[in-house]
Image (cartoon, rainbow, N blue to C red):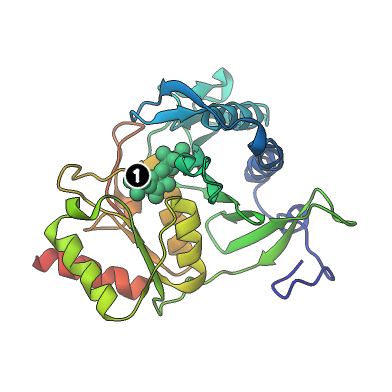
Amino acid sequence: MNETGSRDNVRTLEHYLQGTAPEIVKVYLAIAQSALRLSDELPFHTGMTGGVNPSGDQQAQLDIFSNDLFCDSLLASGVVGQVASEEMEQPRESGPLREHGLSVAMDPLDGSSNIATNNPLGSIFGIWRGPLPQPGRSLLASLFVTYGPTLTLTLTAGKKVAQFVAVRSGPHRGSYVLANDGMVLPDTPEVYGIGGERGKWTPRVEAFVQTLEKRGMKLRYGGTFIGDFNQVLKRGGLFAYPELTNKPHGKLRVLYESAPVGFLAELAGGASSDGRRSLLEVEPRALAETSPCYVGSRGLLRELQSAFVRA
Ligand code: AHG
Ligand code: MN
Ligand code: MN
């Protein structure tokens, strides 16, 4: 499958990953297989659990199902010593690999409030070496999954960004094939989506969003970071879950959400920021620490940071 929809000359994920460090390949393939399984299971776990996660969010059955599925397959890969997750107070560990093996921080199901309405969902993974927390600057690789009309994997191991689509029928059934290699986040901004209640945006966030509206950018907000970011990656623009008057550190978790996506955005030629510096420079002291998150076209992010300094 390529961008024109052709099934000729397909390049599978496994083929594409020849030349990538074998440990990273094992992690990618564990995630890829589990994402197929999760996608098949989505219709069967639609309720709430009644519990809350360490951030205080209500946990859906799918949050727990996806968390356990990815944890088990990552720890069974033989290269992962620690899995930290938005849905767990403490990381799950594989003793001998804890210090020097790979560590994965994940949001196993991003956008769980969209389950009930059948809007896009995602999964986010950051891959480091050694115990977490660590800053985004030390990431070795990151990956996100979209469960939308198609199941896609978007990944980087520190160089190019590539996107793959899962094939569900025909000779390549059950594999992921390359849909987009060397992705470039356009510098001409087209779309924007800003989370949080508008009345709670700080004055400098409100002022900057008004400049986006005046220049004719289109509002696209779906309530799943990954779904919204994927649009920005393809079309250029800005996704933000900004500082709020009642939540100065925003909502998105640095390790589980914003650093892995910031890493990928920067490697696609875009930029990320906490309002002052790259999200990759944020040094989380706790696993579930949050920061304001701005990610998108490089020129626009430069404008945002300058406007924030002047405000
Ligand atoms: P999660 O479902 O993993 O907790 O993440 C939800 C996040 C993110 O995906 C989205 O951008 C944001 O929360 C939406 O928040 P609002 O509903 O407050 O806009
Ligand atoms: Mn999330
Ligand atoms: Mn989540």
With respect to residue 200, does 96 lie above or below?
above
Q: Is residue 256 visible?
A: no
Q: Which residue is mark 1?
A: 252
Q: Residue at x 59, y 26 (%)?
A: 68
Q: Secondary structure at mark 1?
A: loop
Amino acid beneath label 1: Leu
The outermost residue toward the right is 171
Q: Is residue 261 left or right of residue 27?
A: left
Quadrant containing the C terminus is: bottom left
Mark 1 neighbour class, 10 Å CA radius: few under 14, some 14 to 19, many 20 or more: many
Pick the residue in front: 82 or 31.
31
Q: Residue at x 63, y 29 (%)?
A: 69
Q: Residue at x 54, y 47 (%)?
A: 122
Query: Residue 47, located in which quarter of the rendered image?
Result: top right
Q: Is residue 16 visible?
A: yes
The outermost residue toward the front is 117
Residue 44, horizontal then vertical, whole percent: 66, 32
Ligand 2 rendered quadrant: top left
